[in-house]
Structure formats: structure tokens, C-alpha cells
Image: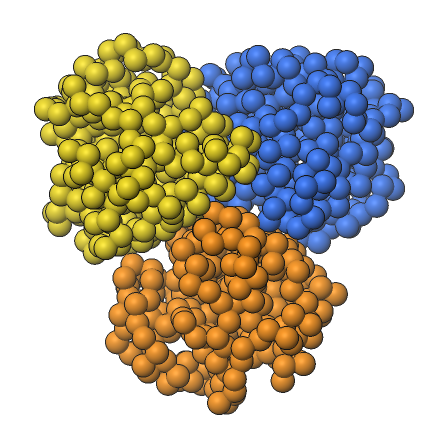
Chain colours: A yellow, B blue, C orange
């Protein structure tokens, strides 16, 4: 499995997937930059009268509900319906759905009307989406790992997709397979957008690899290793973020095979 | 007083205040990052059908009118009314109100309908808000210090809040007390968002400290010292901004006590 | 000619042109920062009920259709009409017009109703705008240089403005003169917003120099040299972008005279 996972990086760099992103304005620049650094081609096309058409010509669609203006809300639903019709991979990032009912409503509407290949959220968001109680504070999860495996599996089966729950350890499942990844460093929580950037990377790998479980594992491991590499060079958040972009640019099959901390259960 | 001011940093890191920010898209990423680096928890929840609910669960609200879309305008008014009802601290950053009448109108509406604990603007904005003539160019103040003390005191009494006027020296008053702070470096004016980041920090400290005068002083001194520290390592704007984030991460009670350039008049 | 081009940098730093930018949310921070680093004064005033008034007091207007919300669309048209009336220089950046019909419609409307001094796009966008077939992928041009000279000249004559087509080599014409510039490095395509930042710089120089052909050449050469300088210090995209801002800050008449790779045909 690790060979399949690591090979996704090479596939991505050969295919240069075009990733349409409708994402929050806080980290939209970071998402574009990390996709470019990783080898994908980002396009933040989000006007409601563009998103349907643009989704058709993309290889993957990234939907992040972090700052959900009314226009973005309409655009996301139209783009995800378009992606369903044209068989385009979709990654859904339900930022803040655990604490804000309106975001939960939009997330469920997207899941109902459109197509979603990967749901990527923090532990609190994933548990909340699975109908479990969760502890969140604003957009951050302050929950432990209790119940997370069940939530991930439940959602994967419910929506027939791959589910990623991030935290100290990251849980990934397609309903049958389950991976636990332990790469990453604490400082990733001190720069805004680590979660969004991971979501964008999932869209990049999903646009290059048929097996979305492998695609999600590749993105999660790559982000984690990049964090570890960045931390070797910078212990403070400003410098760390710069080095994180450099490190993603350097990731390759070998670094993944050598440094991945993944177990399958 | 300096002990009270410096202790706010420790209080902030213990409380990790949740700061809701409705702010301009130019520097929204910088505001989130500097709040994280300082030890607060930012959440840029600004959709008009989220902002009222979200303000209730926050510890502070940061309102910045820099790029004021119609949806943001509605959201700001709703969030500030919600903050008033739920007793949440509010920082208002009247970016551009001196040069653009419409921004002035929205700023005054927020002051009338909602709750504001700290108004933080540049000299031109504060003078203009106080009804004085001011010299501005676009969103920048090109005014001197003449009349600034009076404007700060007048506004503080008029709106029963703390007022911060930034410039070569920064003036802070709650109507009774008046502090003048001389930390900072010229290069802070060559990166976009130094003012916005300071406003965000004010919301962070206001969410952790009851005495908003002390809270404002802590934010202003911290930003100034961080600028000085960053300038020791980087003399050009790209590198300087990276080091600024690193330096905010490093601020503590001791650095404030040692390096604060504050006088009370 | 190189003396005229290099002198624009000095004029810009003396005049500190106020540049109003209505631009995409992906790179709005980068555009503001590079304008500040170069010596201009950016103001991202884009609310539809501000843009008409604000254009009047600006020295130049930068319009970038990358993420075109409905409110931005209205604002751009109002600001460009205002600029026409008040004789303010306008730079139009038709991001994505080659792949998205709606963007092309808005771009043409701006050209019809308002005033445009410089059109700056990648090869695919410029050819597409000139009515030629073009090869694009999302917002990126994957076209060669074939037909580009003709497209640039045609558009310059058609709209009586300066046209810049970027690519491995950059083509600039005012309908009579034609310059080809070969500065820059490949890594500029691995950070988001290099094109937007160049567009912003064009607005900066256009706000300081009457001859818009010289102004456009200055911006293109400055961006290219800054890329080369940054690449000497950083080979990876995160660090490279930081050094790019530092390098723009350092550009002066001498570096342009020494390092410009420009030919006139």
C-alpha cells in the first residue's frame, strides 16, 4: 500500500491536475501556493455564474466553507452538481460545521445534492457530522480520539466516500480500509490554514489518483512530513510557514516511503 | 501600571480568547496568523447569517471596515448588536473613514447601535471621527500629532470607550488616563496590514483583560516591540514580515517590562 | 529609451502614487505588499458604493477579474467609468478571460464603457482577447509565442492602449513601439500571483509616468529582475516569494540599466 500511496506524488506531478477551489478568504492564498508547490494547478474560480462551467474543465474541486458568503454558498452547490454530472473528484472541507448550524446545513446540502469523494475535517467536525457529540471551540476541535474511528467509518459508509479526521493522529477510511497517520508537528496548529492547505492537497491528489483512499493518505502524509521538515529549520510560526511551502515542494516518493508513519487497522 | 500591562500577555495565553473577526480581505490571513502567534484563537466568521450567533460564543469581536462588502456591512452591525447583548468585548478599526464618507457612515452606525470597547485608528481616522480636519491620502494618515490628544480624549468620552490613535507615537486614552507609546519602526509602514494586525491584537487582549485601557496598551507595545525585534533581523519588507510573526510569538511579560517605551500624561 | 524606463522607478518613489485596486482575493495581500515595497501606496477600495468616489482621488486604478464576485463586477465598471471622467490611469488584468466566457464579457464591457491605459495578460489571455485561438488550462496559458506579436499590436491599436503579453518572453506594445523583455525565472510560475503582482506594479508605474509604454516596460523589467535576484537567494517557492518582496524593495535605476534584457523591434 505504501508504494501506491507514494506513487501518487509522481502521478500528480505528471498530470498537474487543475484544481478549482471555492474556499475561505483567510487562507485562499496559502491553498493556491501549496497546490502550486506540490505540483498541481490551482484556479480559484468562485463567481456563481462561473463555477458550474469551470467545474467541468477541472480535474478536482475543493470546497471549503470557512467564510461562506451567500455567493460562495450558491457557487459551491452549483459546482458540486456540475462535478457530479461531469465525474470530477470533489473534496469537502466542513470548516466550523460543529459550532455553526448554518454551516452544517450547507455541508449536508452539498452532500445531498452533489458529489463528494473525500470529506476532510478535524475530529470535532467529523464527529459532529456523524451525529456524535463533539467538543469544539470556534473552528477548532478540542476533542480527543474517543469515538473518532466509529465516526470516520460511519460517515464513509453513509456517504460512500473517503473520510479524513485530523488531530494528533489522523484517521482515514473508505468504509473498509482504515489508516492512522502520525506525521506532523504541534507548530502546524500555530499557523492559520494548515487544515485548509491539507484539504487543498487532498483535491490535488484526488485529481491525479483513482483510489481516493490512497490519494487522501498521500496528502495527509505529505503535509505531515512537510511540517516535520519545516520544523527542523524553523521553530517559530512566521518562518515555519515559509519553510512548510519549501518542504512541500521537496516531497517525493522516497521521502514518503522513508518517513511515513502510517498503520492500517 | 506596567505590571498590569505586561501581565495581560500571560492572561491571554492562559485564556486563549476566541476572537471573531470580520475584517478586510487584504490582511485577513495576517490577522489570523498574528492572533495565533500571540496565543489567541481567531475565527473569521462573517457570513451575515452566522455572525450574530457566532459573536455570542466569542470572547472578543474585531470589526475592520477596510474592504466593506454589503454582506460584511450587515454582518458587522448584527455581530456588534449581538456582542452588546452578550457582553462581548468589541474592537472597531475604522480603516479609511477619513477619506471615504460611506465608511464613516457605517462606523458611526456601529458606534450607535452596537457596543465598542476600543476604537483603534491612525491619527487621521481618529481626528476625522472626532470631527476635526485631518490630512489623509487613501487609507493612510499623513497628519502630524497636532490635535491628536484632544481627539483621542474627546472620542473616549463621547463613546465611553478606549481610543488608540497610531502614528510615530501612539496615543491611548480611556477618557481619564492617557498613555503615549513610542515603540515600533518605520518599516512597519512598508508591509500591508500592520494597523489591521494591531487591531486584531487589541481584540485578543480585550478578550483576556477587563481593563481595556491596559489591554490596548499591551497590544500596542507588543506590536511595537515585535517590529523592533524583527528589524534587528531583517531590513527589507518580505523578510521583515516573516520575522514580525516570529517576534510576536516570542513576546512575554519580561520583554514588555524591559522594552516598553511608554509614558503616562 | 532605457533611461526613460529606468527613471520611472525614481518618479514612482517621488510621487508615491495612490493605487486603487479591485482585485482577486487570492493575491490581494501580495498585490498590496509589492506596491508598498516598490514605493506606491495601495488602497483596496472595492465596495460598489465606494469605488466610484475613490477612483477620483487615486493616481491609478488596477482591475483584476480573477475572482469576480457580483459586487466586484459592479465596482469595477463604476470605478473605470469614474477613472475615465477624472483622467485616472487604468490597468486591466483579464485573468481567466480565455477560459471563462463570463470573464471575457466583463472585460469587454470594461473596455467599452471605461478607460484602459494598459492591458496586461498572459499570452493565452491576450490572444484570446484579440480574437485568436489560444491554448489555456484554467487560468494558465500553455501557448507558445506564435501569433503573440500580432495579437499585442492588434489590441493596442484596437483599444488605443499599451498591451503587455507575459510568457517566457514578455511582449509590450503601444501599437507603434514593440519591446520584448527576457528577464525573470521559471520559479515565478510556482508562486501564485506573480502575474497579479506585475499587474499591480503596472498600475504603480502608470500612476507615476505619462508614457504608459515606458511605465509598462519598467514594471515588467522590475518584476523580472526581482525574480532573478530572489532566485539567487532561494530556490524553493516559500522562501522565493519572501525574497521577491525584498528584491522589489531594492530595485533602482541602476539595477534596471544594468540588468534589463530588453530589445525593441
B86 and A265: which is toward the camera? A265
**Where does the C terminus of chain B fall, quadrant-wise?**
top right
- Percent across and percent down for residue B226 are 68, 33
Q: Count the numbered circles shown.
A: 0
A130 and C252: which is toward the camera? C252
Residue sitting at x 53%, y 64%: C228
Q: Is residue C52 shown above or below A183?
A: below
- Percent across and percent down for residue C236 are 45, 51
Whether residue C200 sits left or right of residue B141 in the image: it is: left
Residue sitting at x 57%, y 12%: B14
Whether residue C121 sits left or right of residue C81 in the image: it is: left
- Percent across and percent down for residue B120 are 68, 32
Q: Is residue C89 visible?
A: no
Q: Is residue A159 shown above or below B148?
A: above
Q: Where is residue C57, by image quadrant? A: bottom right
Q: Is residue A190 visible?
A: yes
Q: Where is residue A205, by image quadrant? A: top left
Residue sitting at x 35%, y 78%: C145
- Percent across and percent down for residue C244 are 55, 56
A7 and B58: which is toward the camera? A7
Outermost residue, right side: B265
Residue sitting at x 85%, y 33%: B150
Q: Where is residue A67, by image quadrant? A: top left
**Where does the N terminus of chain B fall, quadrant-wise?**
top right
A97 and B231: which is toward the camera? B231
Amino acid at each position: 500500500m505504501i508504494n501506491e500511496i507514494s506513487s501518487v506524488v509522481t502521478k500528480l506531478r505528471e498530470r498537474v491536475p487543475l484544481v478549482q477551489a471555492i474556499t475561505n478568504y483567510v487562507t485562499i492564498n496559502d491553498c493556491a501556493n501549496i497546490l502550486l508547490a506540490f505540483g498541481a494547478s490551482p484556479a480559484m474560480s468562485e463567481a456563481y455564474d462561473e463555477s458550474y462551467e469551470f467545474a467541468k474543465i477541472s480535474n478536482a474541486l475543493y470546497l471549503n466553507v470557512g467564510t461562506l458568503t451567500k455567493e460562495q454558498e450558491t457557487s459551491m452547490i452549483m459546482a458540486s452538481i456540475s462535478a457530479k454530472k461531469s465525474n470530477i473528484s470533489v473534496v469537502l472541507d466542513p470548516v466550523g460545521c460543529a459550532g455553526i448550524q448554518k454551516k452544517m446545513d450547507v455541508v449536508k446540502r452539498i452532500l445531498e445534492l452533489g458529489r463528494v469523494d473525500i470529506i476532510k475535517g478535524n475530529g470535532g467536525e467529523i464527529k459532529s457530522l456523524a451525529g456524535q457529540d463533539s467538543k469544539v471551540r470556534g473552528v477548532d476541535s478540542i476533542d480527543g480520539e474517543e469515538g473518532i474511528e466509529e465516526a470516520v467509518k460511519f460517515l464513509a459508509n453513509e456517504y460512500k466516500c473517503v473520510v479524513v479526521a485530523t488531530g494528533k493522529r489522523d484517521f482515514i477510511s473508505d468504509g473498509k480500509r482504515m489508516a492512522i497517520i502520525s506525521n506532523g508537528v504541534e507548530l502546524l496548529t500555530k499557523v492559520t490554514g494548515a487544515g485548509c492547505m491539507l484539504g487543498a492537497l487532498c483535491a490535488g491528489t484526488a485529481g491525479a489518483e483513482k483510489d481516493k483512499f490512497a490519494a487522501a493518505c498521500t496528502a495527509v502524509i505529505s503535509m505531515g512530513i512537510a511540517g516535520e521538515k519545516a520544523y527542523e529549520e524553523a521553530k517559530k510560526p512566521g518562518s515555519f510557514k515559509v519553510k512548510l511551502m519549501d518542504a512541500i515542494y521537496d516531497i517525493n516518493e522516497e521521502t514518503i516511503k522513508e518517513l511515513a508513519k502510517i498503520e492500517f487497522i
